[in-house]
Image (spheres, rainbow, N blue to C red):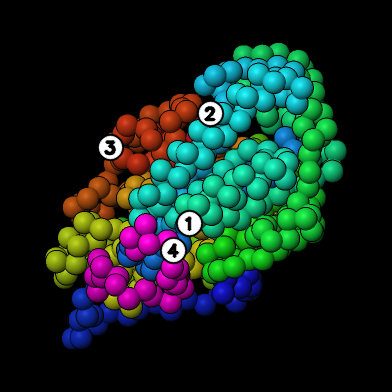
Amino acid sequence: MPSDPPHPVTNHHHHHHDHHADSPPRPPQYRPNLNQAPAGDFMIPHRQRAPSHPPSRSTNRLGVQVEDTRICVVMVGLPARGKSLIAQKVVRYLGWLSITAKCFNVGNYRRSATPQPSASFFDTSNKEGERLRKAAAEAAVNDMCRWFTHPNHLIAILDATNSTKSRRRWIKDRCDAEGVETLFVESKCDSEDIIMANILEVKTTSPDYQGQDPEEAAKDFRDRIRMYERIYETLDEDEADMTYCKIIDVGSQVIINRIQDYLQSRVVYYLMNLHIKPRSIWISRHGESMFNLSGAIGGDADLSPRGQQYAKMLPDLVKKSAGDAPLTVWTSTLKRTAQTAAYLPYEKLSWKALDELDSGVCDGLTYAEIEDRYPEDFKARDEDKYNYRYLGGESYRDVVIRLEPIIMELERSENILIITHQAVLRCIYAYFMGSSQEKSPWMEVPLHCLIKLTPRAYGTQEERLFANVPAVSTWREKGSKAEHQKAPGDGVAASPSTKGEDQSTDVPSMNGNGPPASAETDAATVAT
């Protein structure tokens, strides 16, 4: 069953591991090959399919038993209903859970033949336009079917209007012939405010309108919507044999029909928590702590004097980025995040699920002490940091599993500011930015930096505000046991980039650069 929504807690308890010279702690436990899935992982059952497809067996890196389960999620809906945003979010969510998924956007196939068509191209009486649109759909479906031949390719999202019953039936027949399940997802919205916000989004971000006058783009896009409205057929009882999820007015009503297995229900549960209203999420690490100064990991340390200074500056940073937007602040249950949030004039909730990665018996040690006491495990963690699990503690993989309810709560919320810890922030950031498991545990996440993430239909936009409060660097490269190590980007002003997580830098980081050397605050924007 999907995870239950997390419940905020208000008590601030943390179990600290004591270390005694006469009874040294047991060494950390390294489990690089988790053949037995830990609690919370997914077990996907075997599904028989046509003999022409030899059965395959594999396990994804989250421990999912994958045997012949393949699903095509088919988007349905008029333009400006958030279909592409939903499609991209589903891909990122599944990838974050180590389930291989890919989006096939029919518009991208159509753009190769007609890069910037006018609204008349979408008129049903335009025979040439109709032919090209059908050819684009066929090309996308053909590529999708080829993609599914790989044994670990589980879920494809077909992103298009798919606005008629005949088109949907054609897609289902094609998928049935390939042994692929279909899950139709319709976004039906009549709210003029949301439609207008989505039109604004499309005219400024869609490849169809690059370089065009925004007002002309908006008018053309409205005309395009009217063309589709003439032929649009919503999912109804005539298609009762199909598996579908119908999301009405941004989730105010959800209709589910014939969900057939666990993986489909997993996708539907996620969709039920989504909304497509414009919003942003702000994330920040706690201010510099006393453990940061000493190079120790874990613990429940207080803020350092510089960390307290950041906490006092944070309300102004948030005001500069968020303006008067209503916000709720989420912290962990550890003192350093509560102290960082102390001066913020917003409602606050603390979540146990946002606590830092539990370092088990290594809690309170420096990396030099860990390397000295447990050299083999120190090396093993560097070799597979995402899967490494401390004895009595956690791995990054474990943190992702316990953060899933937080992600669900985030997706159904509006403007949220999260103050949390390095490993947890890396995992949340990786979800929104689509970072790989290999990169996310090594990302440079500077202290005293406020990050604003704004989900968009064609990627997540990122803005950073750096406070002029010095702090130690807690980033370390593979093999390093230094208490503090200067990241290669330190002292370099952040600059706009469009590469996001694919930047060519030795240090995977929020922006590929560190905080600026001076200036009260500095902002930069990244779109991925």
Going from the N terminus, do you reach mark 2 or mark 1 first?
A: 2
Residue found at the very far bottom of the displayed protein: 22
The amino acid type found where label 4 is placed reads: Arg
Q: Secondary structure at mark 4?
A: loop
Residue on which the image places disc 3: 506
Q: Is residue 13 left or right of residue 35?
A: right
Q: Are marks 4 and 1 in contact (CB under 8 Å)?
A: yes
Mark 3 or 2: in front is 2
Going from the N terminus, do you reach mark 3 or mark 2 first?
A: 2
Residue 78 pos. (x, y %): 74, 38
The amino acid type found where label 3 is placed reads: Asp
Instruction: Give the alpha-carbon distance from disc 4 to disc 1, as whole Å.
Output: 6 Å
Q: Are marks 4 and 2 in contact (CB under 8 Å)?
A: no
Residue 268, compared with residue 87, is above or below; it is below
Residue on which the image places disc 2: 109
The amino acid type found where label 2 is placed reads: Tyr
Q: Which residues are magenta?
A: 29-55
Residue 339, compared with residue 131, is above or below; it is below
Residue on which the image places disc 1: 179
> Is residue 143 at all visible to an observer of this figure?
yes
Q: Residues within 10 Å of mark 3 (few under 14, many from 20)?
A: few
